[in-house]
C-alpha cells in the first residue's frame, strides 16, 4: 500500500483537455503519481481493473477529452498468504533454490479466486526462508506455468538467487524443454515459429498473434511420434511469453490437445497436454550447470498409450 491508499480503492477520473500525454498509462502515471507506480498501473490496465468509458483498453490507448477512466484496485500487498501442508514432489534442492514438479490443476501463486491451495502455499510450509523474500505474494517465484500445465518449476530461496535466476530467464539463457500432444499429423520433422504475441484487445485472458505491437517470441518444435490424427512433439521455447507454446502451436495448425482456450477438447485428457519436462540453467551461487527433469505425469502417459493403441 502506498501513501495511505485504502485497501479497497475506486476512483473515476474525467479526462479534461488539452492533454499533454494522451496515452492512458502515461496520463494516469501523472494523475496518480502519489498512489500507484507506472508498472502497477500497466498491470491494472492489462488485468481489466482500469477501463475507459466502461471498455477494456490497452495501456497505450490515446485518451480523448470527456472520457471517463474507472480505476478499481484491491490492495494485495499484505502478508496474508498462509503456509499449507500440501505434498510436493521435489526434484532438486539446495540452500539457494528448489525445483518442484507442479501437477496440472495447481495455480502457482495466490490471486483473485485462488487464495489457497497454490504452489506458494505449499512452498511456504516446506521452505521457511521464503518468508524473508521481498515479494510477499510470489515469494521466490522466478517463472510460472499455466494452471493446467504440469512439470518443472524453479523457486529461489533467497533474494540473491531470485535476482540471478530472474536475469537468466529475462536473457533467455535457460534451456527449456516441453512435451506436447497436438492435434493433427505434423508433416515437418521440425520447425520454428517466430510470430510476435500479445494480449487480445477485448479478452485480456487470451493471447494472440500480433504482427504489429506484439512481443518477440520464438518456439522451436520437433516431432517425436506421429499417430493417426495427432502428434507428440518436443518443444523448446527460446522466449517465455505467456501462453507462447499454446498460441504458436495453434497458429501453425496444430493446437495442443485438451486446450479449450486455443485448441480442442480431448476425450482422453482433461487439460492441455503440455508438460514442462526439463530445465538447464546456471546455479545462482557458483555458475555450475544444473539440469533437472520432471517425468511425464500419469495422465499424459495414458494419453500416449491410447494414441499408440489407436494407431
Image: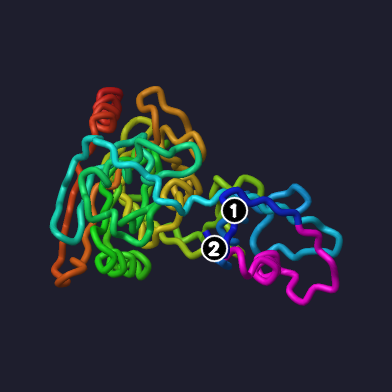
Q: Residue furthest bottom?
A: 20
In the rendered image, residue 50, in percent from the top left (x then y), is placed at: 66, 53
In the rendered image, residue 29, in percent from the top left (x then y), is placed at: 64, 69
In the rendered image, residue 194, in percent from the top left (x then y), is placed at: 46, 61
Q: Is residue 305 visible?
A: yes
Q: Nearer the viewer, residue 59 or 116?
A: 116
Q: Quadrant of residue 115?
A: top left
Label 1: how many Cα within 10 Å (few below 14, some 14–19, many 20+): few
Query: For this view, does 12 lie left or right of residue 254?
Result: right
In the rendered image, residue 257, in percent from the top left (x then y), is placed at: 41, 34
Q: Quadrant of residue 287?
A: bottom left
Q: Nearer the viewer, residue 22 or 241?
A: 22
Numbered label attached to residue 270: none
Q: Which residue is painted at 35% across and 36% down in the image? A: 117
CA distance for labels 1 and 2: 9 Å
Image quarter in which the C terminus is found: top left
Numbered label attached to residue 2: 2
Q: Which residue is painted at 29% across and 54% down in the image? A: 131
Query: For this view, does 133 lie left or right of residue 87?
Result: right
SS for dot 1 = loop
Q: Which residue is painted at 51% across and 63% down in the image? A: 215
Task: Please check the rendered image and state whether residue 54 is part of the magenta-colored stretch, yes or no.
Answer: no
Query: For this view, does 277 lie left or right of residue 57?
Result: left
Task: Please check the rendered image and state whether residue 30 is part of the magenta-colored stretch, yes or no.
Answer: yes
Label 2: how many Cα within 10 Å (few below 14, some 14–19, many 20+): few
Magenta stretch? 13-36
Mark 1 sits on what residue?
6
Q: Which residue is painted at 80% across and 73% down in the image? A: 19
Q: Is residue 182 visible?
A: no
SS for dot 2 = loop
Amino acid at each position: 500500500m502506498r501513501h495511505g491508499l485504502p485497501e479497497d480503492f475506486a476512483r473515476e477520473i474525467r479526462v479534461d483537455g488539452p492533454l499533454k500525454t494522451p496515452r492512458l498509462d502515461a496520463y494516469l502515471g501523472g494523475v496518480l503519481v502519489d498512489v500507484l507506480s507506472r508498472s502497477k498501473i500497466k498491470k491494472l490496465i492489462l488485468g481489466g481493473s482500469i477501463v475507459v468509458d466502461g471498455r477494456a483498453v490497452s495501456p497505450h490507448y490515446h485518451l480523448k477529452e470527456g472520457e471517463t477512466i474507472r480505476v478499481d484496485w484491491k490492495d494485495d500487498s499484505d502478508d496474508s498468504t498462509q503456509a499449507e501442508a500440501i505434498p510436493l514432489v521435489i526434484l532438486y534442492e539446495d540452500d539457494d533454490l528448489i525445483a518442484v514438479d507442479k501437477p496440472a490443476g495447481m495455480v502457482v501463486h495466490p490471486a483473485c479466486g485462488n487464495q489457497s491451495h497454490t504452489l506458494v502455499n505449499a512452498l511456504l510450509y516446506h521452505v521457511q526462508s521464503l518468508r524473508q523474500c521481498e515479494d510477499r505474494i510470489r515469494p521466490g517465484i522466478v517463472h510460472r506455468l499455466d494452471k493446467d500445465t504440469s512439470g518443472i518449476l524453479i523457486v529461489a530461496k533467497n533474494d540473491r538467487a531470485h535476482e540471478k535466476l530472474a536475469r537468466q530467464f529475462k536473457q533467455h539463457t535457460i534451456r527449456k524443454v516441453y512435451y506436447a500432444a497436438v492435434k493433427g499429423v505434423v508433416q515437418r520433422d521440425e520447425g520454428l515459429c517466430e510470430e510476435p504475441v500479445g494480449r487480445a484487445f477485448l479478452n485480456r485472458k487470451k493471447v494472440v498473434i500480433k504482427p504489429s505491437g506484439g512481443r518477440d517470441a520464438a518456439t522451436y518444435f520437433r516431432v517425436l511420434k506421429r499417430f493417426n490424427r495427432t502428434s507428440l512433439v518436443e518443444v523448446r521455447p527460446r522466449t517465455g511469453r505467456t501462453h507462447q507454446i499454446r498460441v504458436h502451436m495453434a497458429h501453425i495448425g496444430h493446437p495442443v490437445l485438451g486446450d479449450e482456450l486455443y485448441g480442442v477438447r480431448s476425450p482422453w485428457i482433461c487439460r492441455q497436454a503440455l508438460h514442462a519436462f526439463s530445465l538447464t540453467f546456471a546455479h545462482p551461487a557458483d555458475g555450475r550447470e544444473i539440469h533437472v527433469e520432471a517425468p511425464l505425469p500419469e495422465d499424459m502417459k495414458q494419453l500416449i498409450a491410447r494414441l499408440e493403441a489407436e494407431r
